[in-house]
Image (cartoon, coloured by chain):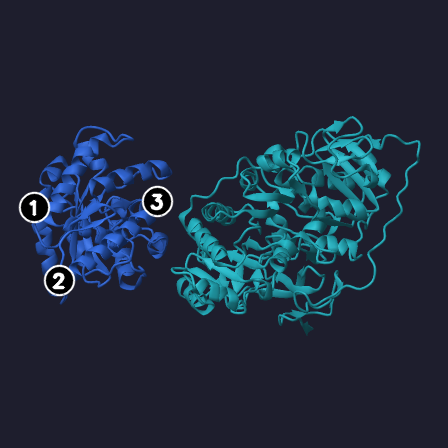
Amino acid sequence: MRRTMLYLPGNNPNMLTRGYLFGSDGLILDLEDAVAMAEKDTARILVQHFLRQGEFGSCEVTVRINGVDTEYWKDDLAAVVPFPALRGIRAPKVDDAATVKIIDEELSTIEDKNGIPVGRTKIFCLLETAKGIWNAFDIASASPRVAAIIPGGEDLTADLKTSRSNEGTELDWARRMLVFAARAAGVDPIDTVFPRVTDDAGLRKETEFIKQLGFEGKSVIHPNQIPIIHDVFNPTEQEIEKALKIVAAAKEAAERGQGAVSVDGRMVDIPVVKRAEYTLLKAGLLEVR
Amino acid sequence: MAKNALGREIPEFIEGYGKTKLFQGAFALKPEGYRAGGKIRCIDSTCTDKRVSDIKAAIAASGLKSGMTVSFHHHLRNGDYVVNMVIDACAEMGIKNLTLFPTALFGVHKKLIEHIKNGVISRIMGSVNGPIGQLVSEGGMDVPVVLRSHGGRPRAVISGDVHIDVAFIAAPTADKYGNICGTQGKSACGSLGYAFTDAQYADCVIAVTDNLQPYPAAPISMSQLNVDIVVEVPSIGDPAGIVSGTTKVTRDPLRLLIAKYASELIEASPYFKEGISFQTGAGGIPLAVTAFMKEAMIKKGIKGSFGLGGITGYFVELLKEGLVERLMDVQSFDLEAVRSIGENPKHIEISADWYANPWNSGAAVNMLDVVILGATEVDVNFNANVNTEADGALLHGTGGHQDTAAGAKLTIIAQPLLRGRIPCVTDNVYSVTTPGEVVDAIVTEYGITINPKRKDLLDACSAVKGLPLVSMDELVSRAHKMSGPTDPVATEDRIIGVVEWRDGTVIDVVRQLKTK
């Protein structure tokens, strides 16, 4: 599950130590925007240290590296990829499939050199420009390493030459486009952060909206946002009850050799069963198959 | 040197304190004999006005002399003018060698340092914090301070351990014949709970007010029966330091996480049911626990019977919403609490004796289900230290820590595992305030650590899916791993503080810090 992926500043030992305690599904140890130029090396060393011996609970651990247009990104990869705790890297400003391929090749080299199965390190692509959004499907399908695509917030807004509104109008189309591209390519669409950290009601509203669009989860900038997002993404008791009924009915029908069945007066066919199974999976009531 | 029930070495006699009684266990000592008597009060029946012209006249009229004991309450907190005003006047009048017996002192009382140095104050019985704590810790007083809990203090007065010669009672409202209340006036502080026993037992009681009302003032909290002298001054305190504004729940994610675990522990306990009573105080974590509990209470459709102790606006909200039936208020922390205690008959003012004294016919803490407390450190035996900091300096008063821990059915200490680099869980606390036998659980950001003697609680929590239970061994080893080794506090032999358990026995002593 990738309902919540929490950013932790790579130069803040306090947050790196305790970040996993807040119960997000994933962690993003950040070497990019959260870290000032003068501290890039310090942060890289610190993050490396934490990957070696830190605790992460059951979180999926990723590192946001600096962009391929900077002098840091290769050093960033070399420092973090060898550690088994790392599941993937979050690459900023991915504009096209070529960027993914450059990173893919570099990852393969490092993995090979360190005796790690090539392809282990996943890529989470941040699409932070209009061009990136336009190329979303190509990016998502550029490498089997791509696990998710994520729209940018602030950078994308700037590239669109507009500003960030409370309603998120300017990101509306990009978000819809991104969900289609991700689903078409078979990767996860994950939403951008909600920047107003004390606006709990605003966060809930936005999360409900992006969940309805089809996103798998959201990037998180403050631990207090996690329970709210989980609350929105977790199936309600009614949804769980309905899903249990559907899955049970489908199982019974299959045993009797029937195709479609009816539950509470509604036809239940394969897509409905799949959706019900997905609900139970999110509720922790079904094992991943 | 003898060892008390916790294995702490306590001398049989401490210079400046006297013969010690060893701590025997939280509930071991039973009192015998009679309560302390007091001087019979009498006033000339033709006197219809107890006012005198100023503080010095009040001091003179009270008969206060060098070597006597004076008491104060701390309801004006960091806004208090009265303690400094009185001691300054004593100094000018040549009175020396006083024993100061406050319910607590604050940063605003830093000025007393000069009076400690010039001999006006020779002894303090009560909490010392900030600069005065540092001074005492470094050996700046000839006799040790005596630290008592909110319940231990009235017990000491009523049982005769401490005799108050003159009690100065800061009174936000008073009339000329000595009727007092705390809910009205520009210096309103709400409850006057800590002052009641002093008014009853002191030889002479002086009300110091900046809001004189026509006789009889109403409402009346403490009556004319126990007030001998009334003195009007321009101001008894700074309202900004007396009460805070609206108390808000913290947004600090770490504190919220700890509060969430504490709340889940309470929900898992057998006490989370209709009629639950609780005390959570005003700190960041406790207040957040209250907020989480409120959600849980609404969800499960249960209502509480009463909230106890220091009351905040948040508790007032619970009362208004019907989630608790009563508030029992020994100290009102913010403007909302002050307003509520003045208006709502379900918001009851209680004395410290009523709140927490172990030796009366039943203190409020005995009726308490759950209390959330803090501590500067807790050890593997669940002993808690609230009096000294990691550097060994006296920094905090005991407050109601001992009393609520002893009274409540579920005592939770909730705090981050480390403050900066300093671990809050250790092998052996530097100084014990509250014994582990009355502490049921520690809650940190790493989870819930239950005292093994509470097997019932451990079973209840194990039955709840997803509750993060952490053993004490695991917690201590994690603290060690994170903080690395720390040097022990270097001290002299000389005792500068005596920590009494609420029954008057000595639970620990604090020694003078070695000069660096």
> B118 or B397: nearer the eye?
B397
Element assignment for label 3: helix
Residue in view at x 90 percent, y 41 percent? B42
Mark number, residue A97:
1
Residue B473 locus on image (x, y percent): 45, 69
Residue B398 visible to the viewer: no
Q: Colour of chain B?
A: cyan
Hue used for the chain lettered A: blue
* Same chain letter for marks 1 and 2: yes
- Judge depth for marks 3 and 2 and give the one in front: 3
B454 to B370, vertically: above or below? below
Q: Which residue is identified by label 3? A: A228
Instruction: Decide if residue B41 is in sight here.
Output: yes
Farthest residue, direction top: B214
Q: Quadrant of residue A173?
A: top left
Residue appearing at x 43%, y 49% in the figure = B256
Q: For mark 2, what is the residue?
A: A111
Q: Chain of mark 1?
A: A
Identity of the amino acid at label 1?
A: Ala
**In this rendering, the label closer to the viewer, 1 or 3:** 3
| Residue in front for this viewpoint, B254 or B274 | B274
Disc 3 residue type (three-letter)? Ile
Q: Characterize the local packing of mark 3: few (<14), some (14-19) or many (20 or more) Cα atoms within 10 angstroms.
A: some
Residue kind at label 2, given as amino acid type: Glu
